[in-house]
Amino acid sequence: MAEKIAILVDSGSDLPEELKKKYGIWTMNLRIVYGNEVYEDGSLPPQTVYSRFPQEIPKTSTPNLLEVKDAVEQIRAQGYSKLIAVCISSGLSGTYNTVKTALGEFHDMQTFTFDSKSISIGTGMFALWAARAVAAGMSFEQITAGLQRKTKECKVFFYMDTLDYLRAGGRIGKITGLIGKVLNIKPVISCNEEGIYYTVAMMRGKKNGMQRLLETVQKHEPKGKLWLALMNGDAEEEAAHVRKQLSEMFPNAERVVDKQITASLAVHTGPGLIGICVFNAD
């Protein structure tokens, strides 16, 4: 009989609702805060965030300790004695530390908190792999070991059309953002081995930036069974172009996710974003 293992993510993992429902993945929602207006991720369409830019740039907040414990209580009430929490990078969010602390208080459950060292669908790919592994009958120990082994087998890259929102959120310095704007610099960013943003390339103009994004993805194609994800932030026209090129570059890959990013991630990245994730699913 297969083990009853729950997979828990936060909404920053960017997994589509249909995949979470299909595999029974539990979610803790981040929040988007406009002064006294507070919205849960998922209840606020990302397009609403874009429509209120640039006059209104909200803040985001992560689940607190009590909210995480409540989520775990709900999972336990459904008969789960084993839980794997997959978190966005501890280098970019406090969620991992909060979840790890909360899970440490449940002594009657076998738990594991995984620091994906990634963001957005990079984290989501790990959660989806773990959920499919549960469905395939893998053990708790096999799945947790597999997640740790796969840390270097997942890469996510983002082309950003503007640096204004990373700057507003304190992710980059004011001088860097200003120089980028004046020179029409379009960066491609990713997460390093510590799970911190770093700049892969800085290109002049959108066309050059998008081309460098695709070249970078092709160079980092992992060996084995390839999963692809294509994300966009208010950039469906650009995504359509990239989608066609990805199909030509990786004809045998499974494109498991293709959608717009969540509202909480839109806050920090602004419009015009294209993200691509490559993941070794073996």
Image (cartoon, grey):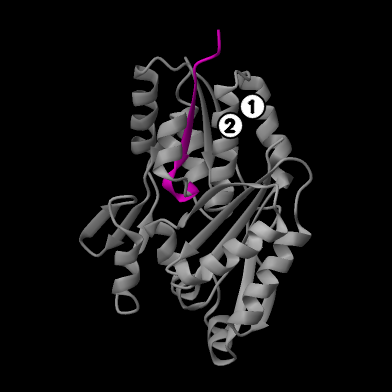
Q: In x, y percent, where is residue 49?
A: 33, 66
Q: In x, y percent, where is residue 128?
A: 55, 37
Question: Of the residues shown, which amino acid type is indicated by label 1?
Answer: Ile
**Exactly how many numbered labels are in the figure?**
2
Labels 2 and 1 touching (C-beta < 8 A):
yes
Is residue 201 toward the left or the right of residue 124 in the image?
right
In what quadrant of the picture does the N terminus appear?
A: top right
Secondary element type, mark 2: helix
Give whichever of 56, 100 is nearer the camera. Answer: 56
Is residue 3 magenta-colored?
yes
Dot 1, crowdedness within 10 Å: few (<14), some or many (≥20)? some
Residue 57: tell me if it is visible.
no
Q: In x, y percent, where is residue 69?
A: 38, 31
Q: CA distance from mark 2 to mark 1?
A: 6 Å
In the picture as drawn, the residue positioned furthest to the top comes out as: 1
Q: In x, y percent, where is residue 254?
A: 62, 45
Is residue 19 toward the left or the right of residue 180 in the image?
left
Residue depicted at x 64% and y 28% = 144
Secondary element type, mark 1: helix
Dot 2, crowdedness within 10 Å: few (<14), some or many (≥20)? many
Residue depicted at x 45% and y 25% = 105
Q: Mark 2 — residue? A: 130
In the picture as drawn, the residue positioned furthest to the bottom comes out as: 182
Q: Is residue 162 above or below residue 16?
A: below
In what quadrant of the picture does the C terminus appear?
A: top right
Which image quadrant for residue 277? bottom right
Q: Mark 1 — residue? A: 143
Stretch of the chain drawn in magenta: 1-13
